[in-house]
Image: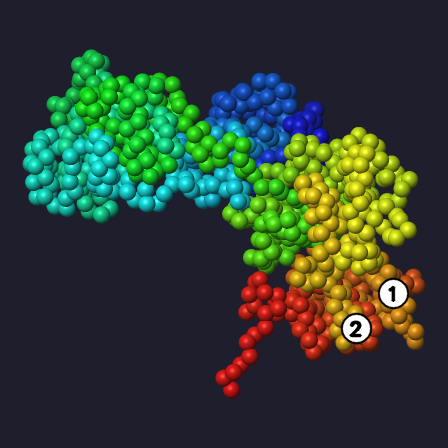
Amino acid sequence: MTQSPQDRRDDHSPEPRSGVQVTGGGRPSPDLAIVETRVYRGANVWSYDKAIHLVVDLGVLEEYPTNTLPGFTEHLLEALPGLREHSCSRGRRGGFVERLHEGTWLGHVAEHCALALQQVVGHDVRRGKTRQVKGSPGHYNVIFGYVDEQVGLAAARLAVRLVNHLVQADPGFDLEAELDAFILRAQRTAFGPSTQAILDEAVSRDIPWIRLNQHSLVQLGQGVHAKRIRATMTSETSSIAVDIASDKDLTTRLLGAAGLPVPKQESVRTADQAVAMARRIGFPVVVKPLDGNHGRGVCLDLQSDDDVREAFDVARDQSRRGTVIVESFVTGKDYRCLIIDGRMAAIAERVPASVTGDGTSSVRALVDLTNADPRRGVGHEKVLTRIKVDAAAEEVLAGQGHTLDSVPAEGEMVKLALTGNMSTGGISIDRTFEAHPENVEIAEEAARMIGLDIAGIDFICPDITQPVRETGGAICEVNAAPGFRMHTHPTIGEPQFIAKPVVDMLVPPGTPSRIPIVAVTGTNGKTTTSRMISHIFKGMGRKVGMTSTDGVVIDERLLIRSDASGPRSARMVLQNPRVDFAVFEVARGGILREGLGYERNDVAVVLNVQPDHLGLRGIDTVEQLADVKAVLVEAVPRDGHAVLNADDPLVRAMRRRCSGQVVWFSMSEPGSEEMDLIDAHCRRGGKALVLQPTERGEMIVVRHGARQMQLAFTHLLPATFSGRARMNVQNTLAAAAAAFAAGAPLHDIRQGLRTFSTSYYLSPGRLNEIEVNGVNVIVDYCHNAPGMRALGDFVDRLGESLDSGHELGKPSRIGVIATAGDRRDEDMRELGEVAAQHFDVVVVREDKALRRRERGETSALVADGVRRAMEAGSRCKQLEVILDEIEAVHHAMSRANYGDLVVVCVDQHPLVMSELENWSPHAQAGAGAGSSDAPVADPDWTPPADTTA
């Protein structure tokens, strides 16, 4: 269920009833259970940001707040100490603990437990609230924020289990084991330190990002501005450069040809070749895989033929191509120079995994003590990696005269790896500001030679503060996609903010990362208004991505034919690299199901709020429906606009929820209450679009402060049917206001409106007018009573013009109507009652999707409404029920005479257009789209003629 904005933004749970106590020392049964789960991936009715929504059932625990459960609070705080930091509604540290002692409901406790569990794995989430479900005692809405969706859901499940365990101990529940499993689950989906550093920098600059898979593939920016990263590889990274860097032999040759210091080396494929090459180069040597990474398979300081043969097998196992490099062994310290966009960003000295003796502990004990450091984890999950004790480590120990059970002398450093890679347990020391300028220049030149935008240059030299060419040393490797954590989290020294130059390279300061987003909602008119806005900006040369109930359209090409008014379709548009302007039709269902599919919209358009879809997903009143629609207004930033219908009281009230500017549109007459509101708004410098009656017709006028600018006569705009289609006049006002708010010049808005029509090509299924053998046919998607009132008004106005053109008799008006099966019974009857006021003959059909209704049930309710209106003296004189849509259209056309008006309220408009084509000798627009073989983007597709006969 929805709440007002004030109710949605605070953090209170119901106060417990007084006098409820546990008697006789008994404990209630652990009945807390999750009844329903929803994941909101954007702004929603509960929160401005993404959140998880649980509906929980307390069962008997409804009668047991926390102060009636002896020991519950103490055990809870012992299990999750972080709860002591929660402020809850008190606004101060320890506020939640106060609530626990005073008594609060266990649904509220589960909310805080879910937040605390996410905080255990490092997710900074603090938003949450718990509200009782109205009319359902013991049921609560529990809402809390999340960073990673799967981690948030796992936290919710574990939180409920923990609360139940604390109510009544479960022998099978081991909190320590459950926490370990939860932490491991979070680590599997967490970003690595390099990716996270880039994302943190992007967020600090208000650059949006979208995770594209379960690993590290991320999109920064939207649409045409999008860039992609995968760890430290970017969309700007050259594939050829990566291939070169992966081939260590080729890398060395290129660097050597550029006069850069590199070791002598050759590639070999057999152990004998390796030995021969080692002799030629001169011992000691290094043997490593041609295309390895992370230091795997690298064997250093090899002094003999036997060492080389043994190392060859190790290196070959890590080489994808089976080729091994033999190179001269360069003595000195191991330095990693990070080059970003051709400039040095950071330098770190890498120290191999090692322990320091204390004179009493064995090497094994020292390793365990070192791995106990909370900064160390498995793989790249933390800033340091645990030292791994394996056969290679034991071999390194043996080379130093030690075993795992040896006790090194106090102060003695014992190595457990030869390479200084962080992934093998090494540590890093920041040397960024100590490097000699000549060494920095060498590293930058090496990155340019290979062609990498982000490169890790591995230097071996005695001292990075002295010129390498004087002291000796060489570049031993150039790495694509180098790790950042040795620079962002050095063991010793200051961290370097190296994500900044990466983001600077991808999104230079001052360049946009977002595309303009216009979101349109309302009970009726959303699709037509969205199409009008898209048409205006298409005429300006923009590549518009649009979502609507008909599908996803990119640059006027229909990519997917389906109901695409939800958040997933919006994300699809934002990921398309061609789109530079987005128009989203946003339906009530998508908001309730998943929230918005984006962070914010630059322009929000709310057309109207009328009684439709009531009784679904906890929305029982039109006021609650308005709260759902208002989510778009709340998603408007301070520099954005909300385009609101001043003629609708519920929409008018949304102005208080807008952080940006309000642009009104209204069809009211001068002197009305609505126009007084607009006049006051414009006196304060505001914007509005209104209708101004003149002797020559209605003029759409743009008002901005004291200025008034004429836009167009309504009767000259094709979509308004000479001004008769009042609903499209309103849609035109809204579209023009949205375009004006989005920065479109008036002449472009004017031209867009003058060239937009309700033809099937521009607006399929929305007020399409065609003539079939002298019969006037209107095809529209009308499916509810408010929409039928607007359509009926148009039918009356159009009917009057048709009547005046026939001297012998008035043309009949035939309506084919239906509604969706998930509407309330009274809404279905109302649709029939309204239709009966405007048509002579009403044919009631049913949609293909019955939506949990029995066949014939929906049509019976609509027909009942028609009969009631007929008994009350409505225009309708004949009612017919034909369930199948095509059969209903066929019947209506069969009984229509020349000059009659047939209005078809469609479900599957391509099939209807195909049926209408059967009644005409000429092709009808969109008739080919109903074929299963038809291309998605071609509504006029016709099967090729069979020429085999």
Secondary structure, mark 1, is helix
Residue 556 drawn above or below residue 47: below
Residue type, label 1: Ser
Question: Image quadrant of residue 14?
Answer: top right
Residue sitting at the far bottom = 949
Secondary structure, mark 2, is strand
Q: How many marks?
A: 2
Q: Residue at x 76, y 76 (%)?
A: 773
Question: Image quadrant of residue 474?
Answer: top left
Kindly report the distance in space between the C-alpha atoms of the residues bearing marks 2 and 1: 14 Å
Residue type, label 2: Val
Q: Residue at x 66, y 31 (%)?
A: 638
Query: In the picture, which quadrant includes the N terminus?
Result: top right
Q: Where does residue 55 sit, x and y in percent of width and height? A: 61, 40
Q: Residue at x 64, y 57 (%)?
A: 550
Q: Where does residue 179 sit, x and y in percent of width and height? A: 44, 31
Res. 387 visible in picture: no
Pointer 1 local density, CA inside 10 Å: few below 14, some 14–19, many at least 20 = few
Question: Image quadrant of residue 104?
Answer: top right
Location of mark 2 (residue): 775
Res. 293 visible in picture: yes
Q: Where does residue 823 sit, x and y in percent of width and height? A: 73, 54
Pointer 2 local density, CA inside 10 Å: few below 14, some 14–19, many at least 20 = some
Mark 2 vs mark 1, foreground winner is 1
Q: Where does residue 369 sit, x and y in percent of width and height? A: 29, 21
Q: Earlier in the sequence, mark 2 or mark 1?
A: 2
Numbered label attached to residue 209 = none
Task: Name the foreground residue: 127 vs 478.
Answer: 478
Location of mark 1 (residue): 801
Residue 175 drawn above or below residue 313: above
Using residue 343 as the reference point, say whether residue 42 is left or right of it.
right
Task: Name the foreground residue: 76 vs 858.
Answer: 858
